[in-house]
Amino acid sequence: MIAAAENATRPGDVVVSPSAANGLPIPSRGRPAKIATVDAGQVERIGRLAPAARRRVTEALVFPCPGTPGAEPTPSLRTRG
């Protein structure tokens, strides 16, 4: 998900500045924590993220699974109890 940078920051957000290459009209935040599946007919490619921004998004997606030795659960993955 991409959101306007003026929206509240959430853990894992990746700031993306507008450019001709990525097609974003305003400063934005990539939100790797908000992944959705949508029909291809409902989306339109407006550009591509630069390699550095893609790397930051990928790094935000990759985290140790709870229960992995030495891994601390992220706040969003902690169980209630």
Image: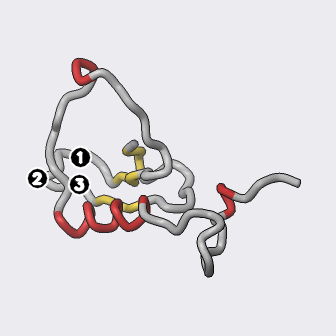
Please tell me which residue lies in front, 63 or 70.
70
Farthest bottom residue in view: 70
- Mark 3 vs 1: CB contact within 8 A: yes
Q: Residue at x 49, y 61 (%)?
A: 12
Residue that carries the numbered disc 2 in the rendered image = 21
Residue that carries the numbered disc 1 in the rendered image = 24
Decide: few, some or many residues near mark 1? Use Cα within 10 Å; few <14, some 14-19, many ≥20: some
Mark 3 lies on a secondary structure that is loop
Three-letter code, disc 1: Leu
Q: Earlier in the sequence, mark 3 or mark 1?
A: 3
Residue that carries the numbered disc 3 in the rendered image = 18
Mark 1 lies on a secondary structure that is loop
Q: Residue at x 41, y 46 (%)?
A: 4
Please tell me which residue lies in front, 58 or 7.
58
Give the answer, above or below, for where 40 lies relative to 51: above
Three-letter code, disc 2: Ala
Q: Position of residue 37 (x, y in %)?
A: 38, 30
Residue 69, by quadrant, is: bottom right
**Lateral position of residue 49 relative to residue 69, left or right:** left
Farthest left residue in view: 20
Q: Residue at x 51, y 48 (%)?
A: 7
Three-letter code, disc 3: Pro
Q: Which mark is residue 79?
A: none
Q: Position of residue 3 (x, y in %)?
A: 42, 44
- Quadrant of the image containing the C terminus: bottom right
- State how the image is colored: secondary structure
Mark 2 lies on a secondary structure that is loop
Q: Position of residue 1 (x, y in %)?
A: 40, 42
Decide: few, some or many residues near mark 3? Use Cα within 10 Å; few <14, some 14-19, many ≥20: some
